[in-house]
Image (tube, rainbow, N blue to C red):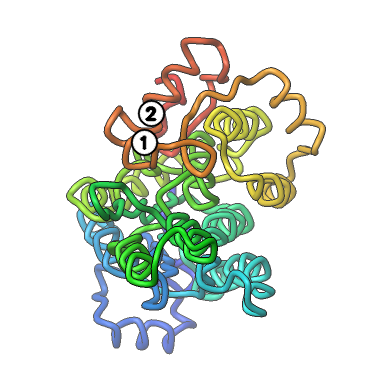
């Protein structure tokens, strides 16, 4: 089958000379014109630790597409950090940013005739926005989560973003002084990556891995390190098989797959934001999935994870014990997941 069924509109049609001339201008050869074009959509920007490293990961995805004899083309879209905008009028822009992300990613794929889409995302609204775009365009693709931040440390105590909120409360209550307060907020977030607990970013990333739209370990691999770099390359390479098998997002995001995703959210004690995001995702996928389905799953699912904000552990600790695949394997052994659902690996969840 044709792997370049969309890009051939601009690369193979003699009545599109300007398109070919402009594609040569960006460095493509005549040989490249016969290859599938893969859009690599990054929400990378400098203003947020969740997103500050994503453009680097997008370059790794591009290396992967080149390895697979594909043409990877990087483009960018916006993001809003809840951690920074919270408590300010800026937070009014957070949820709408999800739909701007979806609209802009869709716009480039459709407008530029790309054959596949890899999304490289970090903060809370990035992931549902990217997945909605992938479902709208319904072209083979993989979602790459930028990964979780490393824990901070002060006086041999692990810190994360919530430690900063707690320090403010302790300061107001007179339990710590200004110097101690400054120490905590300066050390709480040591670099790139999304908030370390089971907040919205890690919740959505874990759920999307269970859904089948990301490679194994995507949600639990740390933001910085060889695992995330290698995984990003593999994501670019994985698109080749998806194109050859014509596996599209709507083949993966089924009612059963959505049930698996929400099962994982429930057992991991995920953010309640997953509800509003997965209702939108299900609608985009044209799958009937309602609040009654969330309740039905919650009624038959135990809560096992001892993760922040309600518990004590971080996503880096999940990584150390085998990541989300270890959790999925455990759930499968207990009959709590439907293992026959297809994933972006061309294998079922159980496989």
Label 2 residue SS: helix
Viewer-proximal residue among 142 and 121: 121
Q: Position of residue 293 (x, y in %)?
A: 76, 31
How packed is label 2: few (under 14 Cα within 10 Å), some, or many (20 or more)?
many
* Res. 216 mark: 1
Residue 96: in sight, yes or no?
A: yes
Picture residue at 65% right of the left edge, 75% below the top: 93
Q: CA distance from mark 2 to mark 1?
A: 6 Å
Reply above or below: 333 against 303. above
* Foreground residue among 88 and 287: 88
Q: Are marks 2 and 1 in contact (CB under 8 Å)?
A: yes
For the question of whether residue 72 can be seen, the reply is no
Say left or right for 345 vs 287.
left
Q: Is residue 122 left or right of residue 72?
A: right
Q: Residue furthest front?
A: 174
Residue 294, how many percent across, how many down?
Answer: 73, 33
* Residue that extends furthest to the left in the rendered view of this protein: 226
Determine the residue positioned at 31% across, 44% down: 221
The tag earlier along the polypeptide, 2 or 1, is 1
Which residue corresponds to mark 2? 325
């Amino acid at each position: 089958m044709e792997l370049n069924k969309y890009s051939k509109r601009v690369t193979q049609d003699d009545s599109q000379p300007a398109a070919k001339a402009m594609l040569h201008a960006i460095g493509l050869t005549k040989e490249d014109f016969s290859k599938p074009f893969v859009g690599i959509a990054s929400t990378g920007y400098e203003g947020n630790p969740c997103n500050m490293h994503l453009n680097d990961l997008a370059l790794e995805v591009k290396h992967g597409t080149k390895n697979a004899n594909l043409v990877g083309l990087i483009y960018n879209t916006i993001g809003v950090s809840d951690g920074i905008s919270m408590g300010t009028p800026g937070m009014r822009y957070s949820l709408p940013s999800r739909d701007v992300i979806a609209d802009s990613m869709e716009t480039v794929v459709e407008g530029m005739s790309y054959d596949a889409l890899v999304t490289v995302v970090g903060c809370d609204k990035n992931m549902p926005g990217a997945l909605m775009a992938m479902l709208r365009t319904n072209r083979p693709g993989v979602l790459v989560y930028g990964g979780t931040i490393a824990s901070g440390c002060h006086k041999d105590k692990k810190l994360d973003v919530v430690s900063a909120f707690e320090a403010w409360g302790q300061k107001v209550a007179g339990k710590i002084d200004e110097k101690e307060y400054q120490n905590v907020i300066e050390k709480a977030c040591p670099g790139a990556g999304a908030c370390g607990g089971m907040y919205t970013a890690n919740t959505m990333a874990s759920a999307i891995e269970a859904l089948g739209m990301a490679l194994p370990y995507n949600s639990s691999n740390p933001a910085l390190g060889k695992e995330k770099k290698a995984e990003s390359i593999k994501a670019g390479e994985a698109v080749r098989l998806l194109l050859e098998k014509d596996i599209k997002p709507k083949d993966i995001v089924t009612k059963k797959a959505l049930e698996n995703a929400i099962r994982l959210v429930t057992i991991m004690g995920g953010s309640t934001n997953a509800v509003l995001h997965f209702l939108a995702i299900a609608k985009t996928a044209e799958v009937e999935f309602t609040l009654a389905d969330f309740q039905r799953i919650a009624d038959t699912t135990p809560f096992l994870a001892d993760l922040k904000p309600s518990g004590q552990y971080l996503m880096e600790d999940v990584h150390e014990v085998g990541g989300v695949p270890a959790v999925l394997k455990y759930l499968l052994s207990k009959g709590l997941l439907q293992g026959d659902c297809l994933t972006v690996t061309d294998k079922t969840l159980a496989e």
